Structures are given as C-alpha cells and as structure tokens.
Image (cartoon, grey):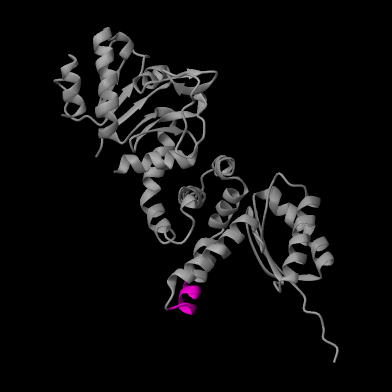
Amino acid sequence: MNIRITFDDSALGFILDAFGKSEREGFVVEKKNPDQKVLTPRGDEIPLKDFAGVRQGSVIFVKSDIVSLIEAAMAMEK
Amino acid sequence: MGFLDKLKTIGIEFPKLKNLLHINITTNIDNSTKIEGSTILINPEKFNRKQKQGLKEIIRATALEESGAILNQNYTPTVDEALKALPDIQTAAQKYINIIPPSDIPLLRACLFLKTRHDNGGSVSEIKEQIARTYGTRGRNLANLCSAGYLEDWFWPLYEILLKTNPDNPETAKAVFRIIYNQIVSELPWTEFVSIGCTAATVTKHIVKKMNRNLQNGVRFINIHGLGEKNVRKIILILPDIQKQTDSEVTKTTRESNRIFIRLEIRQQLQIP
C-alpha cells in the first residue's frame, strides 16, 4: 500500500511553491510567469478554491471536480 | 530511497515510528513534526530555510512518486470513495473503452461513480452538476443514461447486435455503434429525464416535441424517468396532457418511493381499407 500524502488548507501555499506555482487573482499560476495560468489536462484553468492537489503522470494539477478526483485515485492505485 | 529516508537527509527522523501510512503537511501544529498513530504531521513553517527547501525537493521528487498523488485532505473522502469503487468502475468501463470516443472515457468513469453512489443511497446532485459543468449537456445525458441502466440494458446489446450483423467487419460495427451512441448521448431522442429545474409546462412541451419528431422517424415510444418526489409529482401531473396531445397510452409504469419510470406509446392509426 502506498503512503498517503495530504496537505490541509494552511499548507496550500507551501505545496504550490514546491511545484513552482503560486496564486494570482484567485487562480493557480506559474510562479516564474504569473501571467500564465496552470491548466488541467482538459485545458481548464484552476481557481485556487478548486485546487485539489497534484498527481503523477509527469506532474498534473488536480481540480476538485469528480472527473479529476477519479483520475487522482487511479494515479494512487498505480 | 523512500520518503522517510529522504527526510533523514534534511535532519528529520522518526526512530520510534513503526508503521507509517499517512503524512499530512500542515502549519496548524506548534512543532515542526508530530506523530499521531500511523500519521506524521509536518509543519514546514517550523523548519529552517535549508530544511524547508529540502522538503520541497523531496515532495516534488520522491513524495509524488511514492504516493501517486498529493491531495488536499478536504477531498480525501471523495477520493477514498472513488478508490473503493474503482475496481467495479474499471471493469464496467473496460467494455466500452474501444467503442466510445476516447474523450468520453473519463466522463464514463465519472458517470459509473455517480451510479455507484446512487445505488448505495448517497447524494448525487452535486456530482451530477460537476459532470454537467465539465461535459455540458452530453455529460448530463450520459450520467442519466448510466444511472437508469441504459449502458447495460441498451448500449451493450446494441453493440452485440451490430457485431452479429457485421461478423466479418467489427470496425463497421464499431463505427455504426459510435454514430448511434453519439446521437443518443447528445440528443436523448427516445428518453426524457425530467429535471427539477424545468417547469411542468416546459417538460410537457419538450416531450411532445420529441415524440412528434420521433414519430416522423418511425419511433412511436418515449421513456420518461423521474427521480425525486417533486419530479415524480410533476410527471404524474403532466401525463394526461401529454397523452392527449400525442394520442399515446402508458404501456409500462414502474414507481418506487421517489422514482418513476413511464413508457408512453403513440397509438397506431386505424387503417381504413
């Protein structure tokens, strides 16, 4: 069984920073280029309130919708 | 080198820890680390600058690989539910992976999750809204079709018939299936899922329009589904008017506590010799 790694809302900034991202105007953006919003594999922008985490598959940013959360569960199964 | 070994390289050790299952990163603890059963709580704000930088690298390079995903714990209940349902979802989805459009596969998994939650008596309205927000009407339609059992009762038998009628050409069977599948998922031509957001008058108009259009294509029936007490009442209320407008009769009714299914068929016109 894989070790489960989570974070809570208080550590959200630290997790984004660890992956070179930050927040601007309510969206997850590239830290080095804040004009560039981070997108999901389906091309959706990620509002900070909907940022659910990061999953494998290179590094994929996860939104909090059910389609994305199922994909995150699949990544945890691998 | 695993996550714990990597932590040792930045001076963080847990010699007494026997069985690590969970690491939670939080700034809501007073110390840099805390052990709670099989969980380690880590507060990066209590680390020195070098350790903090090292922890970021470990999270990026080792933690993600080791865990598959690093998730906000607000969403772990839903992810746990998905993990539990995943074997059944994958088995059910496997049959359709090569015959429906590839872009619909994640949608199908979400719809199967919705059905599992619904069958287990869980709340589905928020999940259905998420599916509709991500995939539009097509997503809402497939979610409704899956929940009502059409995947197994209609789509798969259709594919099997197409395979039988094209025994030497499965690609043709697949292509024809995909055309029919796309039309049904986009338009729901012979099915109406009554939504709480639509008035009785709107639903009546919609069903009558669908039935008249279907009749032009030789299809004389429509299946009406309603979920929830208000929708059940709405369907019962509008049924006489729809029957009057379309000259149709109820040929099947299934009613449970908060669910209704009605099949309406347009009467055959008498042929005068």
- Quarter placement of the C terminus of chain B: bottom right
Residue drawn at x 47%, y 32% as measured from the top left: A39
Residue B224 horizontal/vertical position (percent): 68, 60
The relative height of residue B73 versus residue B188 in the rendered view (above or below) is above
Q: Is residue B258 visible?
A: yes
Q: Is residue A16 magenta?
A: no
B253 left or right of B33 in image: right
Q: Is residue B161 magenta?
A: yes
B220 left or right of B5 in image: right
Residue drawn at x 41%, y 43% as measured from the top left: B82
In the image as oriented, which residue stretches furthest toward the left?
B15
Residue B247 horizontal/vertical position (percent): 81, 70
Callout count: 0
In the image as oriented, which residue stretches furthest toward the right?
B272
In the image as oriented, which residue stretches furthest toward the top?
B48
Q: Quadrant of residue B219?
A: bottom right
Residue A31 horizontal/vertical position (percent): 42, 18
- Quarter placement of the N terminus of chain B: top left
The relative height of residue B52 versus residue A61 in the rendered view (above or below) is above
Which residues lie in the magenta part? B160-167
- Given residues B137 and B168, the one toward you in this image is B168
B104 left or right of B222 in image: left
The relative height of residue B165 versus residue B28 in the rendered view (above or below) is below
Residue B193 horizontal/vertical position (percent): 66, 55
Q: Quadrant of residue B126?
A: top right
Q: Main secondary structure of the magenta part?
A: helix
Q: Is residue B38 visible?
A: no
The relative height of residue B108 versus residue B34 in the rendered view (above or below) is below
